Each structure stands twice: as C-alpha cells, then as structure tokens.
C-alpha cells in the first residue's frame, strides 16, 4: 500500500531526486530475503578476487580488502529476481516514471561491520546511450542508520545533471560539491524502500556498528528511454571492468 499519493510521488521525485515509501513489503518477504542473502554469502565458489561479479571494500581501520557486494545478483537468486518485478514495486516505479520501468542493474551490498563508506558520487556514467532516467531502488534488509552506513543524499542536486567530467569514467566528487546541512540520510526499516535518481549525488559513512548493513540496489530505466537493456549493460560493464583491472596488471578476471 502506498502511503503517499501517486501524484505526490512523481512531484517529490522530480523536485528532490528521491522518494521514500514506507512499509511497502511485508515482514515475511523481508525475512526470506535475509535468509537468501545468507545463503548467497556461503557461495565461496563465487567469492573470488578475479570474479567480476564481486565488489570489494577495505576495512576502515585495518585496510583489509573484504568482499562487499554481488553485482549482478538476480541471476543467482530466484527470490531477488522475483522482487524486481513485484507488483507493489512496479506500481511505485510506474508512478515515478509515468510509464513502465525496465530493470537495468541489480546488486546486493553486504557492507559488513567496519566496511569503509562510499565517497560522494553519482551513479550515472556517461557512456553512450546510458539512460538518463536511471534510478536506483534501495531495499534494506535491516534497519539502516548513519552509524551503520546508510546512503546519504543531497536533495535537488540531480537537476544539475552530471556534476563531473562526462568522459565515461567513474568520478568521486569533492565533498565541497554539496552542502552537508542539506544531507538526507536514508534511514529505513525492512519493508521500506527509497528511490533515487542516477544524477543524485550520494555517499555513505563507514559501517561503525557491529552488524551487517545489507541492502539491495535495483536500478531501472523508463521503458521509453532505451527499453530492456540489462544484458547489454552488463556486457558493456564487464568490458569496462576488464579494462580497469588490466590497468592494474590483472589479466585473469572472469565472470561467473
Ligand atoms: O552501500 C553504500 O553504502 C553506498 C553504495 C552506493 O552508493 C552505490 O553502490 O552506488
């Protein structure tokens, strides 16, 4: 059930670059996703520095490089694949886009205790054809707070488009780009979701708690903005990642 009127969702999203919808998913579904995240973490056959599916983040104090995320995730997990086309979620996306949504990218970030936060950035990457309608849906598997490293957004700044060089590379933005007094931490409970634009600058703190901070990040584009392009995106992403690894003399990467 949407607690915010549909037209308000679109207005808020257009104005602020994000919306929060509370209590969208029932507790039983969230419990199933937590169990699923634990099952996937036991897939030691997949968690490998050479596997392009895995993302890594250093421990904020020891510097140890640790597993952080699966990207993609839906091809490993029927329950996660199912939630990407959950009717309640598609309805929110329809209200925000004013048209149907297509899944573009899907990841599960574990953010274990001690994980370093993410620097300020935008998710939009200036690759030819990258959809400007790109948005991400955050689905927390536990309560997210500033102390466990929730995502932090800066409302309204998405309207300025790309805030870094539009050269197809990932760029961290200087913190001076944003006014921290305007920061909105996405403090969510399981069952809540937040959607934010690919142009919304965001960052997160270290996970200073003793618990995981697991979140699904499901990204979509509007149907009229390139249609279904998930498979093409991952082909392009893997080519780009392989090139990046090669710059660090890593030529043994694969995708599994
Ligand atoms: O999970 C986080 O702390 C932030 C992740 C993020 O910003 C991203 O994946 O783009």
Image (spheres, grey):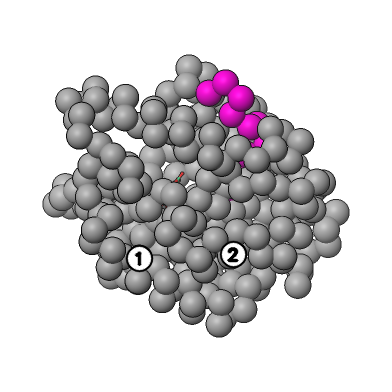
Q: Is residue 158 magenta?
A: no
Along the polypeptide, which appears first: circle 1 or circle 2?
1
Question: Disc 1 to disc 2, how far (Cα)?
Answer: 16 Å
Q: Quadrant of residue 192?
A: bottom right
Q: Quadrant of residue 249?
A: top left
The residue depicted at 63 percent of the width and 32 percent of the height is 131
Above or below, 79 against 98 in this view is below
Mark 2 burial class by Cα count in 10 Å: few <14, some 14-19, many 20+ = some
SS assignment at label 2: helix
Magenta-colored span: 127-136
Residue 169: horizontal and vertical position, in percent?
43, 23
Mark 1 burial class by Cα count in 10 Å: few <14, some 14-19, many 20+ = some
Left or right: 31, with 9 as reference point: left
Residue 221: horizontal and vertical position, in percent?
66, 41
Above or below, 206 against 229 in this view is below
Q: Viewer-proximal residue, 200 or 125?
A: 125
Q: Which residue is mark 2?
A: 83
Above or below, 27 against 140 in this view is below
Left or right: 242, with 156 as reference point: left
Above or below, 185 against 36 in this view is above
Q: Is residue 174 visible?
A: no
Residue 201: horizontal and vertical position, in percent?
53, 38
Left or right: 65, with 207 as reference point: left
Whether residues under marks 1 and 2 lie with C-beta atoms below 8 angstroms apart, the answer is no
Quarter of the picture holding the N terminus: bottom right
The residue depicted at 67 percent of the width and 46 percent of the height is 102
SS assignment at label 1: helix
Q: Is mark 2 within 8 Å of ligand 1?
A: no
Q: Is residue 234 visible?
A: yes
Q: Is mark 1 within 8 Å of ligand 1?
A: no
Q: Which residue is mark 1?
A: 40
């Amino acid at each position: 059930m949407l607690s915010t009127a549909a037209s308000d969702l679109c207005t808020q999203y257009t104005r602020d670059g994000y919306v929060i919808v509370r209590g969208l998913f029932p507790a039983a579904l969230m419990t199933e996703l937590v169990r699923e995240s634990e099952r996937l973490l036991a897939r030691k056959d997949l968690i490998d520095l050479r596997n392009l599916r895995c993302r890594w983040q250093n421990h904020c104090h020891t510097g140890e490089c640790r597993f952080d995320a699966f990207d993609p995730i839906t091809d490993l997990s029927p329950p996660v694949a199912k939630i990407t086309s959950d009717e309640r979620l598609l309805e929110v996306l329809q209200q925000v886009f004013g048209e149907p949504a297509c899944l573009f990218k899907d990841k599960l970030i574990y953010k274990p205790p001690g994980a370093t936060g993410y620097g300020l950035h935008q998710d939009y990457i200036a690759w030819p054809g990258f959809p400007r309608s790109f948005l991400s849906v955050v689905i927390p598997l536990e309560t997210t707070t500033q102390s466990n490293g929730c995502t932090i957004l800066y409302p309204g700044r998405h309207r300025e488009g790309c805030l870094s060089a539009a050269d197809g590379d990932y760029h961290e933005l200087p913190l001076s780009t944003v006014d921290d007094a305007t920061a909105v931490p996405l403090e969510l409970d399981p069952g809540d979701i937040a959607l934010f634009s690919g142009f919304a600058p965001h960052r997160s703190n270290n996970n200073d708690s003793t618990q995981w901070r697991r979140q699904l990040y499901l990204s979509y584009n509007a149907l009229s903005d390139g249609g279904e392009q998930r498979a093409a995106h991952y082909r392009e992403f893997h080519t780009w990642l392989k090139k990046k690894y090669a710059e660090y003399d890593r030529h043994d990467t694969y995708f599994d």
